[in-house]
Structures are given as C-alpha cells and as structure tokens.
Amino acid sequence: MLSYSGGLVLVAALLHASWNAMLHGNRDRFLSMTWMSIAMAAVSTLAIVFVPLPPHAAWPYIVASGLMHIVYNVSLVRSYRRGDLAQAYPVARGSSPLLVTLGAAIFAREAIGPLHGLGIVMISGGIVAIALEGGRVSRAGVLAALTTGATIALYTVTDGIGVRLSDGQAFTYIAWMFMFYWLMPLLFVAMRGFDALWKPVRQMPMAVGSSLAGGLVSVGAYGIVIWAMQTGAMGAVSALRETSVVFAVMIGRVFLGEAVSGKRWIACLIVAAGAVLLGT
C-alpha cells in the first residue's frame, strides 16, 4: 500500500522535523507561526489561480479543516508556554496515529490489516517512549499533549475524507485548505497590532526569514500527507508522518550536538521497525 507514497510520507516527516529545527531558535512562537502562515497562504493564493474549484462535496471538509488548523496553531503556541510541554509534546505526536486510526474506522469505515496495525502501535509506542524517557511528565503536561493529539487526529481525518471527495484533485483541495492560513496574520494583528508584525522584518530579518522558509517547507510536508491519504489508510499515513519525531532526535544529535541516550535510540529503532511494517 505504502511503497511509493510511503516513501514520500517519510520525506514529509523529514521536512516536518526540519522546519521545526529551523524554528527552534525563534523565541516568539506566535510571531513565527504567523509568518509561517503568511508564507503558506501566499503559496496557496498563487496556486488557486492554476487549479479548478473543489467539488461541492469537498467544501465542508476544506472549511472545517482550515478552521481546525488555525485552532491547532493557536493552541500549540499557547501550549509551548507550559514548561513541561517541550517533553510532553511527542506524546501528542505518538497518540495521534492511534486516534486517526480510530476516527477513520468510525467515520470512513476504514479497515486496517494486522501488520499495519502492529506498525501503528509500534510507532506510537516508540514516540511516547521518546517523550517519557527524559524524565517525569506532569499530569497537566500529558493532558495538554493528548488534547493536541486529538486536534491533530481531528484535522487529519477531516482531510483524509475531504481529499477523497475531491474527485482526484488533491492539489486543489490542498491549495484551498491552506488559504485559511490568512486568518493567522489577521488574528495576530487583532491581538498585537500591525507594528508588532512588521517591525521584526527590519529588526529580526533572520528570524522572519526562517519562519517564511519553515512555512514553505510545511506546505510541502503536509501537502504530501493529504495527497497520500487519497488512497493510503489514514492511520498508516499518520503514523509514518509522526516518525518526524525520530528525525528531530537525529537532527538534534547531528546538527545541534544534543545527547541521545541508549534508551532513546532503542525507541527510535522501534519506530523505524514500525515504519518497515507499514511499508509491507
């Protein structure tokens, strides 16, 4: 099922980890997310000139997903203010494939084979192990992470159903859904004012530039995921995407000099083995 498209989803996971690494040094995550959103929305605005209108059946899902992504972005920015979420956030990435699989079974009547089911469990378990290996996570942190995971699962299932109703026009669906990212700068300006958005362009051009670059990479990363869900099982595609946590560990080790324990490497191997099972 996931030979060619599965490889692309792994590329998407690497892209996802890469833009997170690019944004790692930006302290004002709300500002960074807003400039990312501007880049994503600008690309979408250019793209809709060249793609047809989505089918009527897909519109409710485009609107719902677009609004869910804004809620997710704002929630993520707020969640980063919690000191323990930096560790608990991988719990969100690990829980979402299981939630996506459940949601796809309920709302899309999607079945999944035993090997792929085992692969999803291994990936989710490995990711959660990566989160918990570093130390104790508070109950509040876990609750915030699981809430984030539920939000991820909600928009993933919505996009999985919506793209299947787009009559094979995945790029049309992707372009119109990302148009809703124009709401982020509007929200930012409403909360902080236009000067707070524009001044960093002159004062912190590197930070704004990395955010814009991150937005462009993010379009490619999640666009691949939506495209893959046209034919691939949502839970399996979601699980492969969340291997981005493993790529993040590797990027941290190679480029940022971060220490990685033996237990964390074992958890990474479990995730990798799960990905192999999804590719069978």
Image (cartoon, grey):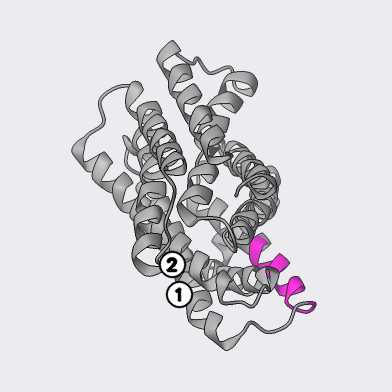
User: What crowding class fits label 1: few (fewer than 14 Cα within 10 Å), some (14-19), or many (20 or more)?
Assistant: some
In the displayed orientation, state which residue is furthest to the right. Answer: 50
- Residue at image location 78% in from the left, 79% down from the top: 49
In the displayed orientation, state which residue is furthest to the left. Answer: 139
> How far from the left and from the top, in percent, is residue 6?
63, 45
Q: Secondary structure at mark 2?
A: helix
Q: Nearer the viewer, residue 231 or 208?
A: 231
> How far from the left and from the top, in percent, is residue 55?
61, 85
In the image, is residue 168 above or below residue 97?
A: below
> How far from the left and from the top, in percent, is residue 268?
49, 24
Q: How many discs mark residues in the rendered view?
A: 2
- The residue pinned by badge 1 equals 64
Query: Toward which corner of the image does residue 253 lie, by quadrant?
Result: top right
In the image, is residue 272 above or below residue 205?
A: above
Q: Are marks 2 and 1 in contact (CB under 8 Å)?
A: yes
- Residue at image location 68% in from the left, 84% down from the top: 53
In the image, is residue 238 above or below residue 177?
A: above
Q: Nearer the viewer, residue 220 or 118?
A: 118
- The residue pinned by badge 2 equals 68
Distance in Å between CA atoms under marks 2 and 1: 6 Å
> How far from the left and from the top, in percent, is residue 60?
48, 81
Query: Toward which corner of the image does residue 207 lie, by quadrant?
Result: top right
Q: Secondary structure at mark 1?
A: helix
Residue 204 can be seen in this image? no
Q: Which residues are magenta?
A: 40-50
Q: Main secondary structure of the magenta part?
A: helix
Tag 1: amino acid: Ala
